[in-house]
Amino acid sequence: MSTELWTYLLVGLSFALYLYIGYASRVRDTKGFYVAGRGVPPVANGAATAADWMSAASFISMAGLISAMGYDGAIYLMGWTGGYVLLALLLAPYLRKYRRFTVPDFIGDRYASNTARALAALATLFISLVYVAGQMRGVGIVFSRFLQVDIALGVLVGVLVVAFFAVLGGMKGVTWTQAVQYALLILAYLIPAFAIAFILTGMPIPQLALVVSDLPERLNQIQTELGFAEYTQPFQSKPMLDVLAVTAALMVGTAGLPHVIIRFYTTPDVRSARYSAFWALLFIALLYTTAPAVAMFARYNLISTLHGKSLNEVRQIEWVAKWEKTRLLAFVDKNGDGRITVAKGNAFMMEGGKPNFDKPDMSNPNEVFVDNDIIVLSTPEVARLAGFVIALVAAGGLAAALSTASGLLIAMASAVAHDLYYRIWNPRAPERLRLLVGRLAMIPALGAAAYLGINPPGFVAQVVAFAFGLAAAGLFPPILLGIFDRRMNKQGAIAGMLVGLTFTICLIALMRSPQLFGTSQPLLKDFFGISAEGIGIVGMVLNMATALIVSRLTPPPPEAIQHLVDAIRVPRGAGEALEE
Amino acid sequence: MNPQNPVRAYWRANLRLIRTLLLVWALVSYGLGILLAEPLSQVRVGTLPLSFWIAQQGSIYVFVLLIWLYAWRMDRLDREYDVHE
């Protein structure tokens, strides 16, 4: 059977399965729609959280990014896993005990303020919208690269599938599809990784192959010969201070992302919320400890396959020819010797973050352009695996993108329908109307996702810094202080959120001005050595400092609120019904 | 255990546990993985520099372990102070 047929078959089967699960878990009340009826066991919730969290970027792009950054790629590895420790120890158990539906629910009630609620709901909407654009783009890319389907059509199919199970099944449908999607995406990631580890090192387990083979040493040696720094040398792409800041910002941002937090609302009790954080990170770690191995193996393989070979010889290799056609790989013979030189620097002039293939960059000898995405997408071919595995990678990439997109849709729909409409606008809305509004709210969210997927604004990748920055500087502090500081009051929390959010938004806008406003140079290069990706941590510190100072200068919160804080600190009673 | 206010005592024990685990969390990731990255590059684990292994592998294993430890210790604490479900 041809690879293409396999791909249609596997993608088709997986989509049919998602539709079936969505239909089987259709819901009739808001509790089912927003928190899956709070009946999800820890292991299943862990798998769902892992799929919810691992996006198209984690699946397709992360290993490539690490491969290009070497040691410093650790900012993503530690940043995107370390946040779960904060989530598990500081937030998840208490938010689960609070027994509501959303993050703005907690912030709005804890501070008895609709201003705080609306701020939190708007931050949730904005963060999720930025994030979902990337997911739909991922869907389009997988469709177009593996099936030669038009990106717009691919995005449309993806949106319709998500629409079906998310609108019908709400959080319940999303949870169970995500659990299945996790199984698919991790298989699709691990099989090629094991194969390439075995071929290059003779040791099939990537995590062990890293430590026992001599490949790291060989890679370091080749890198030095070609004028790069050693692969395992720290702080080559970022200075230490920025590595610290970005890692911290990604950790705190991860813990503050609404679509991740609400996954912990679906467990039956506080204890299961704690254990599902463990399962979630264990499942995530399977991919996150494999990615750096794939990154290193693929880099070694790429350099040793290409460097010094003649162009004609290299183009005989099937995967080279295939990916050169898609422009994920490109060559330019700058010195006219008919051979490929791999060196430091860009092969082509970069324009708006993308290479211009007509303009070679003559300031350096490098003759190869490699798109980061190729590292994961080409491993099955490099490892000469059967068409079946290539199809599995396509289905896995789609699972990663769709699972994250559906989690984000729930977060957006709940911010609009539950927080803004029900809790602020119309608190007397009856249950049936609230469920209907929840379903209706998904339609504009789906429309926005589809639009951004088909017409991605050039700055999508650049504004992801916003999502983590805003979650770190805007949402994490008021939740944390709301649980751990009984004295924290409305005035402090709102002042803190305003300071944290304003600071972070302004600074990211200044540092990313070329992408956002089209200035030729960034208006601000960095903030005392901290880049846009890491600025959220400064925003978080400012938020907390402001909140603590203002709260001490204003009256303590009312008695009832202090009782609420005492109640969420104790696990007992999380399963009891709550008067909505 | 303080018989006057067991809930307060439970909370203090919880905070102690959180503090210890977060200390390990910070030491491993920021300390060994970043601040000491250069000196620890000289030490090897198998064929890899130790700091590289911690930054790209070991820290993640430690994070998983920390979350499990917290859940497991809290099970015991919940029962000890009789606040479990």
Image: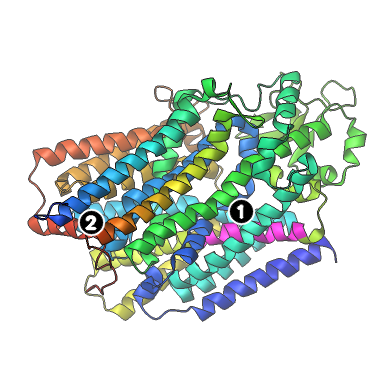
Q: Nearer the viewer, residue A427 or A252?
A: A252
The correct choice, above or below, for A417 with respect to A505 in the image is below
* Dot label at residue A138: 1
Let me know if marks 2 and 1 both belong to one chain. Answer: yes
Residue A402 among magenta residues:
yes
Q: Secondary structure at mark 2?
A: loop
Q: Which colour scheme appears in the figure?
A: rainbow
Q: Position of residue B54 (x, y in %)?
A: 53, 34
> Disc 2 designates what residue?
A569
Q: Amino acid at mark 1?
A: Gly
Q: Nearer the viewer, mark 2 or mark 1?
A: 2
User: What is the distance, in whole Å, between disc 2 and disc 1 at their CAs?
Assistant: 40 Å
Residue A431 among magenta residues:
no
**Labels 2 and 1 touching (C-beta < 8 A):** no
Q: Residue at x 67, y 30 (%)?
A: B47
| Chain that bears disc 1 | A
Q: Quadrant of the N terminus of chain A?
A: bottom right
Q: Position of residue A564 (x, y in %)?
A: 17, 59
Q: Position of residue A543 (x, y in %)?
A: 27, 38
Q: Which quarter of the picture shows residue A531?
A: top left
**How would you rate the neighbour count of disc 1 (Cα within 10 Å): few for under 14, some for 14-19, many for 20 or more?**
many
Residue A557 appears in view: yes
Residue A296 appears in view: no
Q: Secondary structure at mark 1?
A: helix
| Chain that bears disc 2 | A
Mark earlier in primary sequence (2, 1): 1
